[in-house]
Amino acid sequence: MAFRSSGSKKQRGTKIDTEQMDRIVAQARRNEEERLKGYREQSLRIHPWICARCGREFTAKNLHLLTVHHKDHNHNNNPPDGSNWENLCIYCHDNEHSRILDYESGGGAEVGDEEQKPISHKPFAGLADLLKGQKQDS
């Protein structure tokens, strides 16, 4: 006995009704609005599509290679005027974070700790005495 399918049954998931399509479009629009509120999109609207360090220019085609760097390294500090952001290419952005890690691992201060320690080494302290000694010998 062969089982025959009547062509009248709808296959599941093949047709989207109008209400479902409207919900999908509305959700996509809400998602876009949320993305536009993000600091990356804000920075890309405010600042030129140029790396602030190396000057490389970007187009819509390679814009994914342009990142937003927080100058104070605080990702929660996102003023709407963009004053804490700078657009950096992925290479300069990686370099910036590597420099900070190298500085901290070398015993440097924490990021944001700009307190300067007084310099105790005086490389030219004995220079005057050396020069006086040369004048006496001549």
Image (cartoon, rainbow, N blue to C red):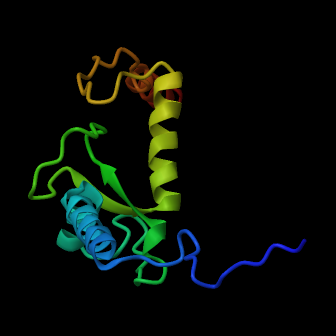
Quadrant of res 113: top left
Quadrant of res 68: bottom left
Position of residue 90 relative to residue 109, above or below, is below
Position in image of residue 22 (x %, y %) = 26, 74
Position in image of residue 90 (x %, y %) = 49, 60
What's the residue at 22%, 58% (across, down)? Answer: 34
Looking at the image, residue 101 sits to the left or right of residue 79; the answer is right
Report the front residue among 96 and 28.
Answer: 28
Q: Quadrant of the N terminus?
A: bottom right
Q: How many marks?
A: 0
What's the residue at 14%, 54% (across, down)? Answer: 83
Report the front residue among 43 and 1.
Answer: 1
Position of residue 88 relative to residue 103, above or below, is below
What's the residue at 63%, 85% (across, down)? Answer: 7
Looking at the image, residue 76 sits to the left or right of residue 59; the answer is left
Quadrant of res 114: top left
